[in-house]
Image: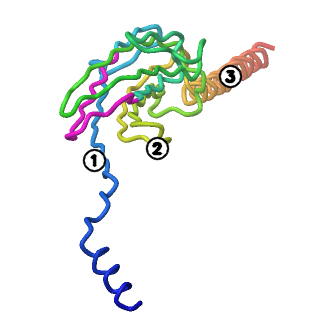
């Protein structure tokens, strides 16, 4: 019996090991987004250019590229993609594409900006931010493989809080000056009336 067990063990040791499950290559992707201007005015159309580069040695199938448009976007378009959300607010553009190994692909989208709403969150006096973010998702993962953003100043169409405060102080100063002048004029008239009387 012992001989049979030893023979079985020796035989099992000579068998080739079962093939290991293939390890998928790591996904390495970069993304950049630009629209070629320094300042984003309300009512202006921004033409975004999104560049996705598969840096890895393996193809990435059915990658999802998502662009969050600026919060003041009134309308958005995307060549070869779909636009989720309508009207002013959070609009998103989505593309699905295969990314061959070492390949670079370019996607384009457009956004027409409306006037900013929240004047209390100014990034600089009289300005707000127009921000857009692009992320690449490989497979069904909820975590992005790569992200990039674009940020611009968006001038306000109305005076900001600091401007309103300045006008309040100027108005108060003008009222005080007017009352002072009126009081001085009345004092001078009374003085003249006393002298002539």
Question: Which badge, 2 or 1, comes first in the chain's sequence?
Answer: 1
Instruction: Tell me if residue 186 comes above or below residue 14 in the rendering.
Output: above
Please give the name of the residue rendered at 47% of the width and 41% of the height, measured from the top-left corner: 141
Q: Quadrant of the C terminus?
A: top right
Residue 166 horizontal side relative to residue 11, left or right = right
Where is mark 2, residue-wise?
143
Question: Mark 3 to mark 2: distance in Å?
Answer: 60 Å
Where is mark 1, residue-wise?
25
Q: Count up the numbered dots.
A: 3
Q: Secondary structure at mark 1?
A: loop
Q: Return the x and y of residue 127 as percentages of the image width and height.
A: 46, 26
Q: Secondary structure at mark 3?
A: helix
Contact, CB < 8 Å: mark 3 with mark 1? no
Q: Residues within 10 Å of mark 1 (few under 14, many from 20)?
A: few
Residue 193 horizontal side relative to residue 100, left or right = right
Please give the name of the residue rendered at 32% of the width and 18% of the height, measured from the top-left corner: 107
- Front residue of this view, candidates 158 and 123: 123
Q: Which residues are magenta?
A: 48-63
Q: Main secondary structure of the magenta part?
A: strand
Please give the name of the residue rendered at 34% of the width and 13% of the height, measured from the top-left corner: 47
């Amino acid at each position: 019996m012992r001989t049979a067990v030893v023979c079985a063990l020796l035989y099992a040791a000579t068998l080739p090991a079962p093939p290991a499950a293939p390890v998928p290559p790591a996904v390495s992707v970069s993304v950049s987004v630009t629209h070629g201007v320094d300042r984003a005015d309300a009512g202006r159309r921004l033409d975004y250019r999104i560049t996705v580069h598969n840096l890895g040695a393996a193809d990435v199938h059915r990658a999802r590229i998502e662009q969050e448009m600026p919060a003041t976007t009134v309308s958005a378009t995307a060549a070869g993609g779909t636009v989720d959300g309508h009207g002013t607010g959070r609009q998103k553009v989505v593309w699905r594409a295969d990314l061959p190994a070492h390949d670079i692909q370019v996607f384009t989208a457009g956004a027409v900006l409306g006037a900013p709403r929240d004047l209390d969150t100014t990034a600089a006096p009289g300005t707000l931010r127009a921000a857009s973010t692009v992320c690449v998702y490989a497979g069904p993962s909820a975590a992005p493989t790569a992200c990039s953003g674009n940020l611009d100043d968006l001038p306000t169409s109305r005076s900001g809080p600091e401007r309103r405060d300045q006008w309040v102080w100027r108005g108060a100063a003008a009222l005080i000056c007017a009352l002072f002048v009126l009081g001085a004029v009345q004092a001078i008239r009374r003085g003249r009336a006393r002298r002539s009387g």
